[in-house]
Image: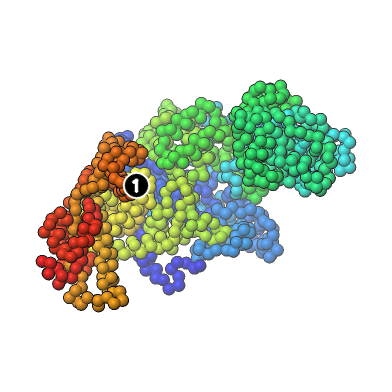
């Protein structure tokens, strides 16, 4: 599909908004409206607002996903600025870590191999290539709605770095410069800053910076942070299992990964199942060695119940040299992991002495540790996954449903044994060995649950998964060992003891692998390595308690977000903070290593508060300022951020004091806005670092997380073309229409949806509103003057007051879709209804001017350029609307809103009724009288009202009144209300059940009205005078129905009933009741006769 405004569609409206946007941004720039300066006194609650957003990575262009998360902070900050708070919203650019260096090196390799500019052959383009991070690829502006075929989408994104750089509209000469990773850091941050300015971000750009040692001030800040953590004992050097990239030769943290973010090492116990002699011909070369089938297990306590082991018949295995004497048979993938865990004769390089298939292993005689059975045998299992564990699986049919069914298949199916050459003596003598007693399941839990679930074979995957779910956790928590030296002990007590026994006796070793597949940004599959490096001791008990305390006092804006933080605090442990490859700051005491990208980004919100003093407005820290990088010693940083004593420094003491005061003015951080994927690392790390390094009164106050952004209900993906950069969106729709659609996309933790039709609609809505305001202002002299006086005036004024209060609640809660609804959509509806109301009498000038003022302020955080234009150019107001103050709301009247809804519903009901009457009179049945003449046309309406409830409705209200607690504003349970109905006179009716069916919907309605309106909704009449409301709006009703004459009458007035004439039967059949008037229509001639 082509761009939205192609194909003959005019861009005039969009160009109008972009013109406004450019003019407003120029004015903001000239007046430095977003430069934040502290006041001389510490701020009282609500007087300042400091929010931040995780700085984005600078290996490409910002896209709508960035803009969506950022918009939550931008809208919130703009709201607080509008209210009069002193707002600081800074922004920086992340360059630490692997992505830039990996991309630069990849580009250099391509130029070296293919020339400059490179010439890629068709065969090379179609061949397998290095993995490309999908977050880096750009898409041409006119392609964001296109879709590739499924096959094309599955084939991946552009494979060559040169092609990716081409997609950024760079020349060949420019692309070659990106072989230098530091060139990326001079190009993309500046471009991002320009795009964010176009977006209208209310940022103090003086405080911006790039990370890494390219900025000497930020480099000094990170070095101080790391030294301080180490001094506090929070950084240690240790041997730990970590996700590792063999190609990069270093640990691969979350932000270094193309796929597999959040994946952790999974530890197994590797059981050494000795292969007994004589060896098969395939293993002859291994004679004289200790050969083991190496089986990975998470349940070492079950090894007493082994009856055999399992192999995949067509699986690929190898015999790998572990040391001079031992050989492990396993998959190559498992051997590679072991080689990085100091379990290979040649470190980091597994040596395969023999290649084997699973069928080569079937029938091997084994001696397995703890097994009660004598030699056991390797047998075929068809469901083994070779991308998990080692491809060798221990068999404990007493407690594993999979093992039980696989063994049963071999026992009961001679043909299956024959197919894989399994001899009877390898299978039939082996019986299930009870080892653990589990309440409800006994001592053969697998056998029982398989029988209960009627599982037929090892291929019944869904039922087997359910069987494991039922037994595994219960076995660990409630199970008791009934064999071995730990017999009588709970499984959870015995498990670590048995694990230790196996390791101490050297009959097992520890083995780790990634929980799931992890690919590095350099394109290789990661392993788990046992590395000696620097770790931050997250999870340490005392530190963890402080982090928990910090979280308890924070606003997380949703229960789901809080649960995510609590879960992360529960499992997070030591974190590798050093790297040997990439960009960043050197570990100050061990400069062979760099600080990794998730460890230099945990406290930098504090750096924002003084960055402009250090960098003099230059994001690279290269401008001459009053301070030199080398002057920022640890003592200086401690003094500014940690309440340390005044340092010995040649920095002027007045300047030092000013920096300290500025930090203490802005801190603590009021809110940090982020995607939910950062809860498991960056955001939780930030909590930890704040609690370690800063006093409690400077701990963060709030973290708000959101889901990812879809585009038109599909995942945003550059590889499929369903993608928009921020630059493209602004050019396509304007900044304000883009922001409008982002606000409308959603606010929760679920994935939100940017709808391009909403952005297009916003262009239309905003420009039409500008036109209406211009017309209204031009026709000011024709408007009615004076204070609000009519019912329509009062309703409109009430809706404005409600909009102010509801929108305030939504902005306070950072729920921007709701703010957009109440502050724009609902106000628009109220204005349109008011115009319709006042068609004849005219609209009130003061009310319209208030409406324009209020609507402009309410939409300011979301559409600030549009609002600024209205404020200054149309309403001729002084100053900037972004700092104009929140509109003052008068007292809201829910009863008036209820009365207006009653009026509107009554008009709709009567219109439908009139249409039915008219269509009935126009289509007489066969043989009936001809249609009425013009003189008999329905032109008169009589509206009969009964303002009091009677009969069963009155009784229902009395029951509700007696079952309502005014203190808690709640009703007693439905069972008690139903019992009260039975005990009143309604319960004495012969047709009680029939009456009860009528009561229930009425009671439900009244409960809702009570929640919305208060206890007076339970009165025996409505909280407003129905006759008064209808009589005040007779002219509106008459005009809406197209009648000549309308009368509002009381159904309890005999004289009024007489006016109905022969139609009185309608009233007798269906009596009017509060909220449900009855209308009778007749011709003028008939009405005159009745009179």
- Assess disc 1: are there few (<14), some (14-19) or many (≥20) residues with their C-alpha within 10 Å of its C-alpha: few
Q: Residue at x 41, y 36 (%)?
A: 554
- The relative height of residue 487 versus residue 809 in the rendered view (above or below) is above
Residue 503: % across, % down: 72, 28
**Nearest the camera: 527 or 638?**
527
962 over 1057 or under it: above or below: above
Q: Which residue is mark 1?
A: 993
Colour setting: rainbow
Residue at the (68%, 22%) spot, across then down: 486
Left or right? Give the position of 714 relative to 45. Answer: right
- Does residue 599 appear anywhere in the picture? yes
User: Which residue does the image show at 51% across and 53% down from the upper left?
Assistant: 188
**Where's residue 98, x and y in %?**
59, 46
> 368 or 96, which lies in front?
368
Residue occupying image coordinates x 20% and y 77%: 933
Please tell me which residue lies in front, 995 or 130. Answer: 995
For the image shown, how many numbered marks are present on the structure?
1
Instruction: Confirm whether residue 192 shows in the render.
Output: no
Please indicate whether residue 970 sits to the left or right of residue 221 in the image: left
1041 vs 957: above or below = below
Q: Quadrant of the C terminus?
A: bottom left
Expressed as whole percent of the image width and height from the top left, the position of residue 912 reads 28, 64
Closer to the camera in the image, 244 or 228: 244
- Which of the 4 image quarters holds residue 552? top left
Q: SS for tag 1? A: helix
Q: Where does residue 303 sit, x and y in percent of width and height? A: 72, 31
| Apparent side of residue 776 relative to residue 98 in the rendered image (left or right) | left
């Amino acid at each position: 599909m082509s761009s939205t405004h192609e194909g003959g569609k005019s861009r005039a409206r969009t160009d109008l908004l972009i013109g406004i946007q450019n003019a407003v941004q120029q004015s903001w720039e000239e007046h430095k409206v977003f430069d934040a300066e502290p006041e001389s006194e510490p701020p009282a609650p609500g007087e300042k607002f400091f929010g931040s957003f995780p700085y984005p990575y600078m290996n490409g262009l910002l896209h709508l996903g960035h803009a969506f998360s950022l918009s939550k902070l931008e809208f919130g900050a703009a709201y607080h600025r509008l209210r009069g708070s002193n707002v600081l919203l800074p922004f920086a650019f992340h360059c630490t870590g692997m992505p830039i260096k990996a991309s630069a090196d990849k580009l250099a390799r391509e130029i070296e191999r293919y020339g400059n500019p490179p010439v890629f052959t068709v065969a090379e383009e179609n061949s397998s290539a290095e993995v490309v991070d999908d977050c880096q690829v750009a898409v041409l502006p006119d392609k964001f709605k296109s879709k590739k075929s499924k096959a094309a989408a599955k084939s991946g994104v552009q494979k060559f770095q040169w092609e990716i750089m081409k997609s950024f509209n760079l020349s060949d000469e420019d692309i070659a410069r990106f072989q230098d990773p530091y060139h990326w850091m001079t190009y993309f941050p500046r471009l991002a800053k320009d795009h964010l300015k176009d977006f209208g971000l209310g940022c103090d750009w003086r405080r911006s910076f790039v990370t890494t040692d390219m900025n000497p001030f930020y480099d000094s800040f990170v070095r101080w942070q790391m030294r301080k953590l180490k001094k506090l004992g929070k950084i240690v050097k240790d041997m730990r299992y970590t996700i590792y990239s063999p190609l990069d030769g270093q640990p691969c943290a979350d932000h270094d990964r193309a796929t597999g973010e959040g994946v952790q090492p999974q530890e197994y116990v590797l059981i050494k199942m000795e292969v007994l002699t004589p060896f098969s011909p395939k293993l002859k070369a291994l004679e004289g060695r200790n050969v083991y089938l190496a089986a990975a297990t998470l349940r070492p306590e079950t090894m007493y119940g082994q009856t055999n082991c399992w192999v995949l018949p067509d699986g690929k295995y190898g015999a790998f040299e572990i040391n001079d004497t031992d050989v492990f048979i396993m998959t190559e993938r498992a051997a590679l992991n072991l080689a990085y865990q100091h379990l290979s004769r040649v470190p980091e390089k597994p040596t395969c002495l023999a290649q084997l298939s699973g069928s080569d292993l079937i029938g091997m005689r084994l001696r397995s540790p703890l097994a009660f059975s004598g030699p056991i045998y390797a047998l075929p299992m068809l469901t083994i996954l070779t991308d998990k564990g080692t491809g060798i699986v221990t068999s404990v049919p007493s407690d594993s449903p999979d093992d039980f069914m696989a063994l049963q298949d071999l026992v009961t199916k001679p043909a299956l044994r024959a197919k894989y050459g399994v001899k009877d003596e390898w299978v039939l003598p082996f019986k299930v060995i009870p080892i653990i007693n589990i309440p409800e399941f006994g001592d053969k839990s697998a056998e029982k649950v398989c029988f209960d679930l009627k599982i037929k074979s090892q291929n019944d995957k869904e039922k087997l998964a359910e069987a494991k779910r039922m037994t595994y956790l219960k076995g660990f928590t409630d199970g008791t060992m009934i064999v071995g030296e730990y017999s009588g002990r709970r499984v959870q007590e015995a498990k670590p003891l048995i694990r230790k026994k196996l390791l101490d006796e050297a009959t097992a070793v520890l083995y780790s692998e990634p929980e799931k597949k992890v690919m590095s940004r350099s394109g290789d599959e990661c392993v788990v390595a046992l590395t000696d490096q620097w770790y931050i001791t997250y999870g340490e008990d005392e530190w963890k308690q402080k982090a928990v305390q910090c979280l308890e006092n924070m606003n997380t804006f949703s229960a789901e977000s809080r649960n995510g933080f609590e879960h992360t605090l529960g499992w997070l442990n030591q974190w590798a903070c050093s790297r040997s490859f990439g960009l960043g700051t050197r570990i100050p005491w061990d400069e062979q290593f760099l600080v990794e990208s998730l460890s230099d980004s945990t406290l930098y919100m504090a750096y924002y508060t003084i960055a402009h003093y250090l960098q003099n407005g230059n994001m690279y820290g290269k401008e001459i300022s009053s301070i030199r990088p080398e002057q920022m010693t640890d003592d200086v940083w401690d003094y500014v951020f940690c309440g340390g004593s005044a340092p010995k420094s040649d920095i002027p003491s007045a300047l030092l004091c000013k920096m300290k005061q500025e930090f203490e003015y802005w801190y603590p951080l009021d809110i940090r806005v982020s995607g939910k994927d950062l809860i498991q690392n960056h955001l939780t790390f930030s909590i930890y670092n704040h609690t370690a390094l800063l006093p409690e009164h400077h701990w963060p106050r709030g973290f708000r997380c959101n889901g990812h952004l879809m585009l038109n209900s599909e995942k945003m993906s550059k590889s499929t073309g369903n993608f928009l950069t921020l630059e493209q969106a602004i050019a396509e729709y304007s900044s304000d229409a883009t922001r409008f659609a982002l606000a409308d996309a959603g606010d929760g933790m679920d994935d939100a949806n940017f709808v391009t039709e909403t952005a297009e609609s916003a262009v239309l809505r905003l420009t039409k509103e500008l036109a209406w305001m211009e017309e209204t202002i031009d026709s000011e002299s024709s408007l009615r003057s004076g204070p609000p006086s009519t019912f329509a005036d009062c309703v409109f004024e009430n809706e404005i007051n409600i909009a102010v209060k509801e929108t305030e609640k939504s902005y306070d809660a950072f729920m921007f879709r709701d703010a957009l609804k109440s502050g724009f959509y609902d106000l628009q509806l109220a204005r349109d209804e008011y115009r319709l109301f006042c068609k004849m009498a005219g609209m009130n000038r003061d009310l319209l001017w208030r409406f324009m003022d209020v609507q402009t302020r309410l939409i300011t955080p979301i559409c600030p350029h549009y609002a600024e234009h209205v404020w200054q150019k149309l309403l001729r107001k002084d100053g900037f609307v972004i700092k104009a103050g929140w509109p003052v709301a008068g007292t809201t009247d829910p009863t008036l809103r209820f009365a207006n809804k009653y009026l509107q519903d009554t008009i709709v009901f009567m219109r439908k009724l009139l249409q039915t009457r008219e269509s009935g009179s126009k289509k007489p049945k066969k043989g009936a009288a001809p249609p009425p003449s013009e003189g008999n046309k329905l032109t008169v309406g009589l509206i009969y009202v009964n303002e009091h409830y009677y009969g069963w409705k009155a009784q229902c209200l009395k029951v509700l009144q007696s079952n309502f607690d005014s203190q808690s504003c709640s009703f007693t349970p439905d069972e008690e209300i139903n019992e009260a109905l039975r005990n009143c006179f309604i319960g004495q009716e012969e047709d009680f059940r029939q009456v009860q069916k009528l009561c229930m919907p009425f009671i439900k309605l009244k409960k809702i009205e009570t929640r919305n309106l208060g206890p007076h909704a339970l009165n025996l009449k409505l909280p407003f005078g129905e006759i008064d409301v209808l009589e005040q709006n007779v002219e509106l009703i008459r005009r809406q129905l197209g009648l000549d004459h309308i009368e509002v009458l009381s159904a309890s007035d005999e004289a009024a009933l007489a006016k109905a004439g022969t139609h009185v039967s309608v009233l007798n059949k269906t009596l009017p009741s509060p909220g449900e008037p009855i209308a009778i229509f007749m011709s003028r001639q008939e009405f005159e006769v009745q009179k």
